[in-house]
């Protein structure tokens, strides 16, 4: 395969890094294959991107919102045209199976058309004034230059989630993608550029998080940072933005659980568990990493899960027979493997998997066998820490109340799932679960772009991506008063007779 050459996109131009230094991204299914070279940018490249975005913001913010939205609609049309090309690239560079890669692009398409519609619905509020001959309303205003720091697991969908509403709201953006998926980001920005966006409105800066990401977060002319990644890095981003008075949106980790009660449809719950735990090789912030099973069905369900996990086919994402793709890189592969040592030391039992795959061509990539951990208790590290691999921990409970308590006993709060036929339990779960997302009789993974996405506790900082709630991330509220009385009227002064 041809190695792609990526560049930064600054002020409408494709450029190498200031230092000319480069890095490689590799195919996680065949690590000897270099997918792309990309710039190892530094603070000088960030400075240029910020200057371009700041200059473009002056005019872009004045473009009517419906006209801004038309650009995003064109991006959606272009994504449709290039869907298969992008999906193939995602599968090669990130590793997920083609069916999932197509879904990644489709999420970007859905976001484009949804965000474009918001260009005619950036609603404010009108409200009566307390005084005569006075009009009161609120309007949304753009914030300014937005730094978008995105992960590798959804290299098209997540940048679209962030960039599209930001641009429709009148901001300019700088995308800093993960260093594992630079080619995907480059192709996406090529599509934004082909849609005709003016120079400087969208910019792309490749590089290492500790260099480019840090420079963006600390830059005095960045007005907003939208970050998706680990809770540890998110804590640094949040603290820095707080100290420098930047708006910040954080979407971080999860330790999501699926509860299966004794009255559940077990076949349906099994489908959800397999997809939630092993879809995208467990490399989703919403992945099902805990299965909380009622004691009455625990043995039966464990056998069912074991039989399904044993049949899952590992391989390169672009192989149509593949169900489980590779781990993104060797560092993460070793991290997942280290958790197996932790599991054994804590007394958990590895029912299946638990090791790096070394058979045939799998040894040429970053493959880890689908893994089920049994005899897990809530206090174990494997039940509390985000592993981010194809590993699910089984926890037995005696009651619905115990299941909800264990589900909530985590520092994270992103997604959750309960399988039950009992409507009273379902509504109690919706009320009592501490998470930003709750599914009833569905898996923990799978988001729709018109609903808010995000979590509580150390998963986020109160903001939500997607849906109309994304507008609250990328706009400021302004209150406007129009006094047509012709005289001074003093609000909040008791001047009534």
Image (spheres, rainbow, N blue to C red):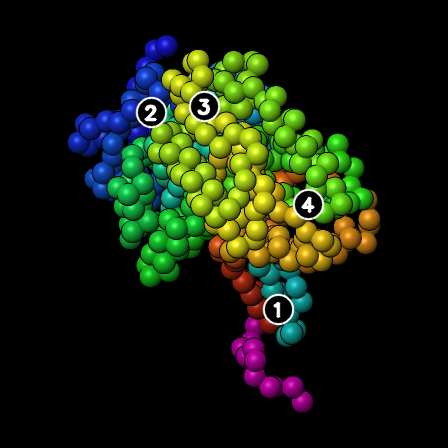
Labels 2 and 4: the sequence-earlier one: 2
- The residue carrying mark 3 is 357
Q: Nearer the viewer, residue 284 or 225?
A: 284
Q: Residue at x 62, y 65 (%)?
A: 135
- The residue carrying mark 4 is 293
Question: Magenta segment, which residues?
Answer: 486-497
Q: Residue at x 20, y 28 (%)?
A: 21
The single residue placed furthest to the bottom in the displayed view is 497
Identify the image quadrant of residue 42. top left
Q: CA distance from mark 1 to mark 4?
A: 61 Å
Magenta residues: mostly which secondary structure? loop
Q: Looking at the picture, how far across and down is residue 261, in whole percent? A: 74, 46
Q: Badge 2: how crowded within 10 Å, few (<14), some, or many (20+)?
A: many
Left or right placement of residue 490 versus residue 173 in this view: right
Left or right placement of residue 338 versus residue 82 in this view: left
- The residue carrying mark 2 is 25
Q: Residue at x 45, y 17 (%)?
A: 359
């Amino acid at each position: 395969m041809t190695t792609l050459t990526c560049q930064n996109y600054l002020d409408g131009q494709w450029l190498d890094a200031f230092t000319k230094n480069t890095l490689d991204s590799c195919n996680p299914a065949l690590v000897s294959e270099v997918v792309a070279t990309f710039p190892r940018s530094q603070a000088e490249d960030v400075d240029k991107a910020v200057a371009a975005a700041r200059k473009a913001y002056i005019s872009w913010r004045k473009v009517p919102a419906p006209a801004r939205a038309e650009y995003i609609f064109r991006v959606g049309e272009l994504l449709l045209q290039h869907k298969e090309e992008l999906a193939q690239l995602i599968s090669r560079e990130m590793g997920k199976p083609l069916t999932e890669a197509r879904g990644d692009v489709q999420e970007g398409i859905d976001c484009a058309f949804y965000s474009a519609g918001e260009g005619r619905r950036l609603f404010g509020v009108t409200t009566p004034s307390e005084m005569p001959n006075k009009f009161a309303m609120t309007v949304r205003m753009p914030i300014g230059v937005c730094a978008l720091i995105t992960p590798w697991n959804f290299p098209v969908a997540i940048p679209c989630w962030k960039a599209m509403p930001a641009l429709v709201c009148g901001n300019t953006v700088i995308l800093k993608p993960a260093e594992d998926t630079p080619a995907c980001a480059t192709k996406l920005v090529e599509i934004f550029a082909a849609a005709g966006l003016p120079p400087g409105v969208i910019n792309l800066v490749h590089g290492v998080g500790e260099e480019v990401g840090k420079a963006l977060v600390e830059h005095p002319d960045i007005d907003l940072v939208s970050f998706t990644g680990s809770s540890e890095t998110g804590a640094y981003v949040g603290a820095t933005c707080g100290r420098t008075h930047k708006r910040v949106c954080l979407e971080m980790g999860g330790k999501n659980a699926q509860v299966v009660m004794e009255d559940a449809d077990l076949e349906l719950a099994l489908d959800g568990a397999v997809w939630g735990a092993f879809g995208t090789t467990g490399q989703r912030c919403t992945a099902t990493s805990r299965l909380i099973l009622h004691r009455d069905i625990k043995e039966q369900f464990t056998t069912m899960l074991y039989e399904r996990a044993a049949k899952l086919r590992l391989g390169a994402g672009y192989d149509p027979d593949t169900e489980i793709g590779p781990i993104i890189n060797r560092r993460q592969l070793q991290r997942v493997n280290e958790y197996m040592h932790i599991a054994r030391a804590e007394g958990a039992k590895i029912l299946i998997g638990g090791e790096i795959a070394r058979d045939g061509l799998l040894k040429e990539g970053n493959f880890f066998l689908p893994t089920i951990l049994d005899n897990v208790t809530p206090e174990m590290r494997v039940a509390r820490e985000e592993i981010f691999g194809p590993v699910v921990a089984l926890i037995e409970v005696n009651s619905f109340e115990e299941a909800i308590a264990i589900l909530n006993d985590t520092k994270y709060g992103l997604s959750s799932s309960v399988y039950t036929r009992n409507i009273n339990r379902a509504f109690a779960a919706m009320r009592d679960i501490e998470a930003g997302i709750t599914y009833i009789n569905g898996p923990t993974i799978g988001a729709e772009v018109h609903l808010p996405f995000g979590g509580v506790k150390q998963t986020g900082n109160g903001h939500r991506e997607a849906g109309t709630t994304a507008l609250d991330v990328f706009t400021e509220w302004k209150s406007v008063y129009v006094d047509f009385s012709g005289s001074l009227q003093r609000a909040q002064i008791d001047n009534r007779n």
